[in-house]
């Protein structure tokens, strides 16, 4: 579904990603780990097409289409969606109106999903205005669920989320990624940034990567990578790079 070829990206006049290549096949979910500031969010924002990320060389191919120079809204139309780490507040736009405008699912399902995510009382509030950390994450996964993208990017879905909200969020993400059906029948794929790996309690991931200083250092079984990082931090990955 997604192929990234030798991607070099500058942010604020400095190269942050130095030749990233990866492929996420149909039906698979990959996770991205790495220390703070290593370029994980930049990679997701570049895939989504935000102008702040300047691609200086390399390609992003989505379902066979070269999207490297396409704007965000065209990538969204093609089926890409992102859950932000720190989404903006949108003053003057009610959440209820927003999800109706961006809806790509059977309308009858919306109230059920809203209820499941405990978001009913937020529908008449401006998007993210005064929402708590956990409420923002539920709002984000609600927006993504109704947008119904085929390529789902989640940027640190766990941060600031309590145990009960984590279950709501994790189950919603699993459902969005069609984890209840066999991989070969899925129409969805995903790329998830995680520091803690809590999201893996709710959905299986197929491949994990470690990004260090803008280089994809290694890839492999996500749980094994996470275990190693939890035991010895990123020092082995860093020494591996030197
Ligand atoms: N607009 C900008 N101008 C200058 N530098 C930037 C800008 N945006 C991001 N950066 C820098 O790019 C680097 C990568 O940032 P990024 O947010 O991608 O890291 P990350 O791996 O997602 O970190 P974290 O785990 O802390 O969220 C950081 O050093 C950051 O300060």
Image (cartoon, rainbow, N blue to C red):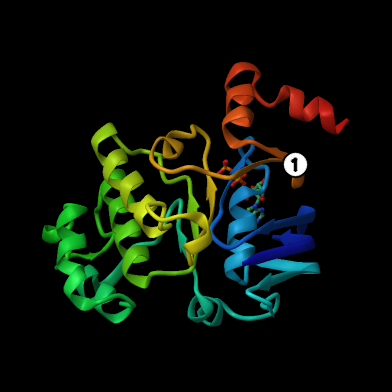
Circle 1 SS class:
loop
* Residue 56 sits in quarter: bottom right
**Residue 77 x %, y %:** 49, 81
Say if 242 sits above or below 209 in the image: above
**Quick one: 119 or 172, which is closer to the camera?**
172
Residue annotated with mark 1? 213
**Residue 10 x %, y %:** 75, 61
**Quick one: 22 or 99, which is closer to the camera?**
22
Residue furthest to the top: 231
Q: Using the rendered image of the protein, determine whether residue 72 is visible from the camera's viewpoint.
A: yes
Would you say the beta carbon of the disc 1 residue lies within 8 angstroms of ligand 1? no
The crowd level at tag 1 (other Cα within 10 Å; few <14, some 14-19, many 20+) is some
Say if 66 sits above or below 236 in the image: below
Quarter containing the N terminus: bottom right
Which residue: 31% across, 45% down? 133
- Is 160 left, or right, of 68 in this rendering? left
* Residue 177 sits in quarter: bottom left
């Amino acid at each position: 579904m997604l192929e990234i070829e030798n991607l070099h990206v500058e942010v604020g006049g400095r190269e942050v990603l130095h030749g990233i290549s990866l492929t996420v096949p149909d039906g698979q979910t990959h996770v991205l780990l790495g220390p703070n500031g290593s370029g994980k969010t930049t990679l997701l924002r570049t895939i989504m097409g935000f102008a702040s990320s300047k691609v200086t060389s390399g390609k992003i191919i989505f379902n066979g289409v070269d999207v490297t120079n396409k704007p965000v809204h065209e990538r969204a139309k093609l089926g890409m969606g992102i859950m932000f780490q720190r989404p903006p507040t949108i003053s003057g736009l009610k959440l209820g109106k927003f999800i109706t405008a961006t809806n790509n699912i059977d309308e009858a399902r919306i109230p059920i999903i809203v209820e499941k995510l405990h978001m009913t009382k937020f529908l008449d509030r401006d998007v993210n205005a005064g929402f708590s950390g956990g409420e923002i994450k539920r709002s984000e996964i609600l927006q993504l669920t109704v947008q119904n993208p085929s390529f789902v990017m989640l940027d640190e879905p766990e941060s600031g989320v309590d145990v009960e909200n984590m279950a709501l969020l994790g189950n919603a993400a699993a459902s969005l990624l069609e984890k209840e059906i066999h991989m070969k029948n899925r129409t969805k794929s995903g790329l998830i940034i995680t520091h803690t790996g809590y999201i893996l309690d709710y959905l299986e991931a197929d491949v994990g990567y470690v990004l260090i200083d803008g280089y994809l250092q290694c890839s492999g079984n996500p749980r094994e990578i996470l275990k190693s990082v939890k035991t010895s931090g990123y020092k082995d990955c860093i020494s591996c790079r030197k």
